[in-house]
Amino acid sequence: MSTSEPCEESSNATREQVLRLITRKENIESEIKELTQVLESQKDVGMNGALVDNEGFPRNDIDVYQVRHARHRIICLQNDHKSVMKDIEAGLHAVHAQKRGDEDTPKVSENIASTDESSNLLQPFARVDSVSSNSPAYHAGLLTGDLIISFGTVTSTNFRDLQNIAAVVQHSVGRSVSVTVRRESQKIRLSLTPNTWSGRGLLGCNIVAM
């Protein structure tokens, strides 16, 4: 679900549109971070921890309702984040297509770029250790040695351990996940779709924390 609107033809409207989208993206990331902290406060149950005990009863050492609500909200926000990122990308193309004589255009482009960079912090938090042939990771273009800057909504600002990536993967089966990597001196954005394949796991690659 996305509350964004399509960019209008007017140059001013386009700039304002993109800036609103940037603000929404930042709000989404902030809320995801807060909800992640909620899950951590509940015995670090995360997105996949059991909510029932060995006898099948709801655990009494955590707030099950709060955990379920946080998990559901995170999933919704992850979908919103992917949608708003697509809208920002489309808006950025529209801004760059405007006349170079518009003195405000560089400011907007710089704002968008800096926001994207601040989101990723350009600081890798994990490394691709291996990629299996014909796997989802292979077809997405991931290479051994790629340094992961962002994996869906996971960046160095909210990364705790590899369980964060696993949660995104589990809730994105059959749906593309935006992955940004640093490869040598380049920053590359890829689209990775977790799915079952002939090998192990949903990605077909081994990722290690840095």
Image (cartoon, grey):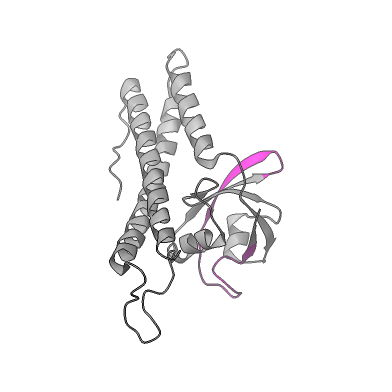
Question: Which residue does the image show at 70% across and 38% down from the upper left?
Answer: 185
Residue 129 at x, y = what percent?
69, 60
Question: Which residue does the image show at 43% across and 66% down from the upper left?
Answer: 45
Question: Which residue does the image show at 48% across and 52% down from the upper left?
Answer: 152
Please tell me in which quadrant of the rendered image residue 173 appears.
Answer: bottom left
How many numbered marks, from 0 up? 0
In the figure, is residue 65 to the left or right of 180?
Answer: left
Residue 1 at x, y = what percent?
30, 51
- Residue pushed farthest front? 61
Above or below 33: residue 202: below
In the figure, is residue 38 to the left or right of 138?
Answer: left
- The reply to whether the magenta stretch includes residue 205 is yes
Q: Is residue 83 visible?
A: no
66 or 171: nearer the viewer: 66
162 or 183: nearer the viewer: 162
Residue 112 at x, y = what percent?
46, 30
In the figure, is residue 133 to the left or right of 159?
Answer: right
Above or below 202: residue 88: above
- The reply to whether the magenta stretch includes residue 81 is no
Residue 153 at x, y = what percent?
46, 50
- Residue pushed farthest bottom? 55
Question: Which residue does the image show at 35% across and 21% down from the upper left?
Answer: 11
Q: Which contiguous range is marked in magenta?
A: 183-206
Q: Is residue 130 visible?
A: yes
16 or 23: nearer the viewer: 23
